[in-house]
Amino acid sequence: MQVYPRFDVEFKKKGSLNFDMFKSEIFLNRGIDSGVVFGRWFALLLIGVLMGAIAFGMSQLEDFLVESRKEIVKEILEKSN
């Protein structure tokens, strides 16, 4: 297992950001408030419900537009005969 940050010559030639900061001991040992956890789950639930409602509405709108188009074409064809 390699230890980061590396201090060898090849590593010093390269520049990078420290993306492992969320694996620090302080971050891993922090306490999470139950209100924050509830808020996250509520936000996910709300997003899911809204996405489902939008998808349902779009499906209904599509069905309505297809049926309307069929009726309009049917009326045009009946008038032309």
Image: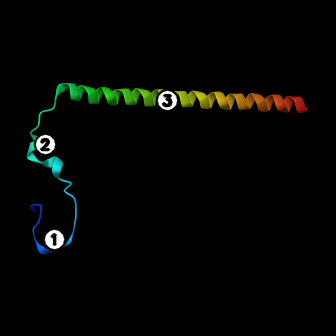
User: Of tags 2 and 1, which is closer to the observer?
Assistant: 1
Disc 1 element: helix
Task: Identify the disc placed on residue 12.
Answer: 1
Q: Amino acid at mark 1?
A: Lys
**Residue 26, position as x, y percentages in the image:** 9, 43
Task: Identify the disc placed on residue 73.
Answer: none
Disc 2 element: helix
Q: Amino acid at mark 3?
A: Ile
Mark found first going from the N terminus, 3 or 1 = 1
The crowding category of the residue bearing disc 3, from other C-alpha atoms within 10 Å (few below 14, some 14 to 19, many at least 20), is: few
User: Of tags 3 and 1, which is closer to the observer?
Assistant: 1
Mark found first going from the N terminus, 2 or 1 = 1
Q: Nearer the viewer, residue 15 or 8?
A: 15
Q: Amino acid at mark 2?
A: Phe
C-beta proximity under 8 Å, tags 3 and 1: no
**Residue 34, position as x, y percentages in the image:** 18, 26
- Residue 38 relative to residue 32: left or right: right
Instruction: Name the quadrant containing residue 19.
Output: bottom left
Residue that badge 2 annotates: 27
Q: Nearer the viewer, residue 56 or 8?
A: 8
**Residue 17, position as x, y percentages in the image:** 22, 59
Residue drawn at x 11%, y 60% as measured from the top left: 4
Q: Quadrant of the C terminus?
A: top right
In the displayed structure, 27 sits above or below 13; it is above
Residue that badge 3 annotates: 54
As drawn, the residue found furthest toward the bottom would be 9
Mark found first going from the N terminus, 2 or 3 = 2
